Structures are given as C-alpha cells and as structure tokens.
Image (cartoon, rainbow, N blue to C red):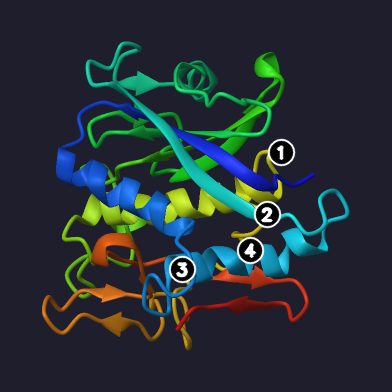
Amino acid sequence: MELSGDIPVSVLWYGRFTPAQKAIVTDFLLSLSTAPGQAPAPSVSQWWSTIDRLYLSKADTAPGKNARLVLAGQVSDEACSLGKHLALSQLPALAMRARPPKPSGGVTLVLTADDVAVEGFCVTRCGLHASNAQTNNAAYAWAGNPARQCPGKCAWPFGAQVVPPNGDVGVDGMVINMASALAGVVTKPFDQGDRAMTACPGVYGKGAYPGYAGELLVDEATGASYNANGAHGRKYLLPALFDPDTSSCATLV
C-alpha cells in the first residue's frame, strides 16, 4: 500500500538545531511540492515526481492521485526529554508528539541533533521509516544529524572533496537520508525498510561507482556540489532512485 494525495508532514526537532539548520530542512520539504517551473531544472520536485512515475502511478490503490507532501507543523524538544541516548523503540513515542491531524494518512518526521545517539545510528543506519501500530499505523521517518558522530558515513559524499550545497555537512547529509526515508514512507509506509532507495546507495549522478558520487553540478559562486534546485534558491544533493523497469538507477544529472 502506498500513500497518495496530499500527505501532511509534521516535524519533531529533538535536540538543538539552529534557525539556519531548520530553514535548510523546511525549505527542502517545501521544495518537494513546488510547482513545475518555480525552481530551475533539475529540481527537488522533479526528483519527487520520479517516485510517482516509477512507483505510485503503477499502484492499484489510488490511481491518478499523486503523492504531495505538505508541511503541516513543527514541534521542538530542545531539552531532549527522553535523554540523549535513544532506543529505536522510543521513536514512535517521539513521533506521536508531532503527528499530523490525519495520522493514518500523514507522516511524522523525527530529526535528532548532532549530539543525540540513536540505536544503530552510524553503525547500521543513517535513518529509517516505519509505522506505529498503537496509532492506527501512523507512518513516521527518522534521520539524525551525523556531523559529530559519523560524517564520513551518514553525510557522504560531503567532506574535503565535495562541498555541501548549504554549507552544513551534517544537515545537508541529513537531507539525503531524510529524502531516502520519505521516499520509503510514501511507497511502503507500513513496512520498515527503504523500498525505493536501497538499490542505489551512494549514487547521485551519472557514472557513479563505489567511492565516487557521480557527475554533479557545481555552484560557481560557492564551489558546492548539488543535483537539485529547491525553494528560495536552495540547492540540494538527493539520492538516485531505483527504476524497476530498467533495473538501473534514475539520476537527475
């Protein structure tokens, strides 16, 4: 089963995020539903429409209804009320705090700060998506800021060779993992995993191979690498999507 139509997305900020960091994320979420032509190609909304073309349009459950993510609200827990070491079993409770008005058809995005450790973070995962059986299978996704804990793993390819498009290795990396989790939520909301993503790890442009992200666009002013334009002049780096028809990775550039 896939989600379709207008999907409200609520955000829970767990730990301290600066206003600039929050703006990078919220502008990304707004970019997902930007109308064609409002951002130069290749765009974030073009990346999202690829999910509809490859997966949602072929579903029998909701023909003709595109999935459109709509930012519904934000809640902050800067004091880290559950502590700074979280088990995966605590994520549903955090998601409950910011769940959208229609929990059965919406998504809660739990984002953890760079000093918050989550079970398996940096070791087996950089983010995930799942559903909460106690709340009518309300879907949620989680991603952590890897800046302090594992930038080389969960913020790759950003680092010495690849400059992040918004000047923040941790948050730009978190956007990559958040995008993967959101794609998984929409295409398979009630199962854990990454249905649309796992076949193309580390692929961001044509010619990618292990250790090389592929051919990327470069901002002449900043030297930053990106493959998608977004709202308010933002630029982002987004992962390739697996094309089940061709068994290949669909990239924006």
Q: Is residue 191 left or right of residue 119?
A: right
Q: Which mark is residue 61?
A: none
Three-letter code for the amino acid on which mark 2 is drawn: Arg
Q: Which mark is residue 195?
A: 2
Disc 3, SS: loop
Residue 149 image position (x, y, % from top left) = 26, 42
Q: CA distance from mark 1 to mark 3?
A: 23 Å
Q: Which mark is residue 191?
A: 1
Q: Which mark is residue 51?
A: 4
Which residue corresponds to the image point at 26% horizontal and 51% vertical from the top-left?
A: 24
Instruction: Please state which of the two labelled residues, at mark 2 or mark 3, is closer to the viewer.
Output: 2
User: Badge 3 local density, few (<14 within 10 Å), some, or many (20+)?
Assistant: some
Q: CA distance from mark 1 to mark 4?
A: 17 Å
Instruction: Please state which of the two labelled residues, at mark 1 or mark 3, is closer to the viewer.
Output: 1
Instruction: Please state which of the two labelled residues, at mark 1 or mark 4, is closer to the viewer.
Output: 4
Sooner in the amino-acid sequence: mark 4 or mark 3: 4
Query: Which residue was labeled with disc 3?
Result: 202
Disc 1, SS: loop
Residue 128 image position (x, y, % from top left) = 53, 41
Which residue corresponds to the image point at 62% horizontal and 25% vertical from the top-left?
A: 103
- Residue nearer the viewer, 37 or 2: 37
Instruction: Please state which of the two labelled residues, at mark 4 or mark 3, is closer to the viewer.
Output: 4
The image quarter in which residue 241 lies:
bottom right
Disc 4, SS: helix
